[in-house]
Amino acid sequence: MIKHLHMLFVALSLVSFISRILLAEFNPDVLKQKWLRIAPHVIDSLLLLTGFALVIIGSWFSADYGWIIVKFIALIVYISLGVTAMRSQGAKRWSYFAGALLCFAYIATVAVTKQALFFL
């Protein structure tokens, strides 16, 4: 059940991020609505909570599960790129957005394969 909730929040987080980038580019006034400023934080907080719950339930604290640490580091990069994309304009925004999406894809692939260096 926690895994399914986590995957739901992953999907909601991605849709939220893409929607906010598109709104920031094409209709930034809409982003001033209070619920659009709060909802992404609620979704992402629930995403993190379910992720931590999965780590605890799965007993993934040992060194054998280094892929979780890699996911956490990649998450920090994803957040940094996403924030920068939201604050940038024009071509820079789209470059940071693409980087954030690549980072998101990496995190998802590591989650599925449980291998940090799956590409080797």
Image (cartoon, rainbow, N blue to C red):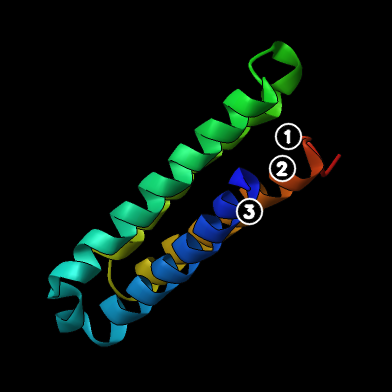
Question: In the displayed image of the protein, which residue is found farthest to the front?
Answer: 1
Q: Nearer the viewer, residue 5 or 112?
A: 5
Q: Nearer the viewer, residue 86 or 44?
A: 44
Asked if residue 80 shows in the view, the reply is no
Q: Say which residue label 3 marks.
A: 4
Residues marked 1 and 2 touching at CB (< 8 Å): yes
Q: Secondary structure at mark 2?
A: helix
Q: Say which residue label 1 marks.
A: 116
Q: Say which residue label 2 marks.
A: 110
Residue displayed at 78% across by 35% down: 115
Question: Mark 1: which amino acid?
Answer: Ala
In the shown orientation, is residue 86 left or right of residue 73?
left
Q: Quadrant of residue 51?
A: top right
Query: What crowding class fits label 2: few (fewer than 14 Cα within 10 Å), some (14-19), or many (20 or more)?
Result: many
Q: Quadrant of residue 23?
A: bottom left
Question: Mark 2: which amino acid?
Answer: Val
Where 35 sits versus 82, above or below?
below
